[in-house]
Amino acid sequence: MAGTKGVSAVILYLSMILILAMPGALADQAYNCTPLPPGADPDQACNASSQMYTILRPSLNDTSQWIEMFQAAPRAYINPKLQSQLGSSGGAHITLLGHMNYTPSERDQGTCGNCWAWAGTSILEIALDTQLGIKDRLSMQYINSNYNGGKGSNWSCCGGWLEDLTRFYNASKILVPWSNSNAQWQDRFESCGTQTGVSAGSISVDPHYTLKSLQAVTIPTWEMEKEEAIANIKNVLGQGRGVWFGFFLPNQTAWTEFFNFWGYQPECVIWRPKECSAAYNFTNGGGHAVLCVGYNDQDPKNRYWIMLNSWGTTKSRPDGLFMVSMDMNYSCSYSGLGYAYYWMTLDADFEREAPPKAAEERNGEVRSPAQVRDEAERKVEEAKEELDKVRADIDSKAGAYPQLGPGL
């Protein structure tokens, strides 16, 4: 019985680890998927926040530059073998959330317009785990405090595009963990009209991960059959790569509808973007960027993408997620702006040395990573020696008492 209990305990432990490692993976079953009726009180129904969420309101010059960068970027690799498998599959539920280590309520950009950096940095978090087996949360404060000096009309809170993130990291070459000293997110109440509240020099950059190179690449979705666009996005996700999804809505009415969807509806209700018929209004239209972490197409009538936002959580969105219908117009275009939806990812190349370890403190003494590693190796050798002694002792007793059988 003791052995059975031990096995059961191990199974329970592994099950808990799996659940904790994949926040949001069970979202479909976890919440009431009944949409709120029109006119319902959101505070009574799901304790939704009354705040207006931060979006990008770029100028015509800004959007023109972003679209030019998108069109000039190389295309993402589409794995032909994976593409053929996707074409013959009968539906799947896939999420990359298990590759991330994050707290949903802390993924809150607040009044800072740096959604573009949240979504892009999260792709790097996924890549760290899929490529190097390192699950770590990366600092948003590091880029906010350093990007264009952390102030002015072009700092991180004023908006940006995925290529802006690649230029920043290709220059710095380092990825700073969220757990470093002063590296946690602290600019939630800053905006384009202010400046960072955390000086760049106050953020510890040791330890860090080292980048060799980084490149933004586009996922083809425009002017093609819907199923081909869907297959291209699935292909990139199937390679274990997060997807940056930038989308524009044309006016304040459209954004109010989306704010109501985010704030008032349960996490598993699917957002269905409307067809593009309105002209883009540069005064009250705007854009937003989120991270696509997976999809579910098991129900052919309700296929959706799984999106991780950077607007914190609500009572009905404990994982900070929302679902977007796959059956959307991928070539949606507004007069005066152009295409509405932009799907991208990152080609990241990391240094392959052993992952950094933070210095440990014990009995008031701070030990370096090398000291921590040396002690771990010493303990392993001591354990091996102890095991050899036990084996020798058992063998000697087995020789004296043959009924005990051979040694281990």
Image (spheres, helix red, strand yellow):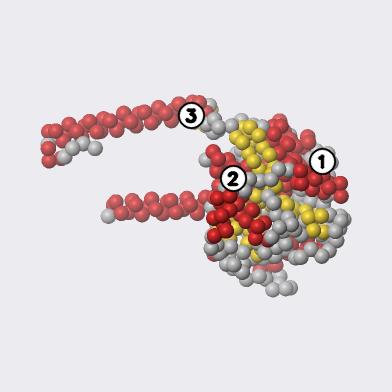
For the residues labelled 1 and 3, say whether their Cβ atoms are less than 8 Å apart.
no
Mark 2 nearby-residue class (10 Å; few <14, some 14–19, many ≥20): many
Query: How many angstroms separate mark 3 from mark 2 (CA)?
Result: 26 Å
Instruction: In the rendered structure, find residue 126 and report the number of the disc placed on it.
Output: 2
> Residue 124: x and y, percent?
63, 42
> Residue 286: x and y, percent?
80, 55
- Can the viewer see residue 108? no
Query: How many angstroms separate mark 1 from mark 2 (CA)?
Result: 27 Å
In the picture shown, does residue 224 fall above or below 130? Answer: below
Instruction: In the rendered structure, find residue 262 and report the number of the disc placed on it.
Output: none
Mark 3 nearby-residue class (10 Å; few <14, some 14–19, many ≥20): some
The residue lying toward the viewer, choosing from 257 and 74, is 74
Tell me the amino acid under the disc marked 1: Asn
The nearer-to-camera label among 3 and 2 is 2
Identify the residue position indicated by label 1 in the image.
154
> Residue 59: x and y, percent?
86, 49
Identify the residue position indicated by label 3 in the image.
372
Which residue corresponds to the image point at 50% horizontal and 54% vertical from the top-left? Answer: 19
The nearer-to-camera label among 1 and 3 is 1
* SS state under label 2: helix
Of labels 1 and 2, earlier in sequence is: 2
Q: Number of callouts in the render?
A: 3
Which residue corresponds to the image point at 84% horizontal and 41% vertical from the top-left? Answer: 153
Which residue corresponds to the image point at 24% horizontal and 37% vertical from the top-left? Answer: 408
Mark 1 nearby-residue class (10 Å; few <14, some 14–19, many ≥20): some
* SS state under label 1: loop
Query: How many angstroms separate mark 1 from mark 3 (CA)?
Result: 42 Å
Relative to 65, is 230 on the left or the right?
left
Tell me the amino acid under the disc marked 2: Ile
Which residue corresponds to the image point at 79% horizontal and 58% vertical from the top-left? Answer: 333
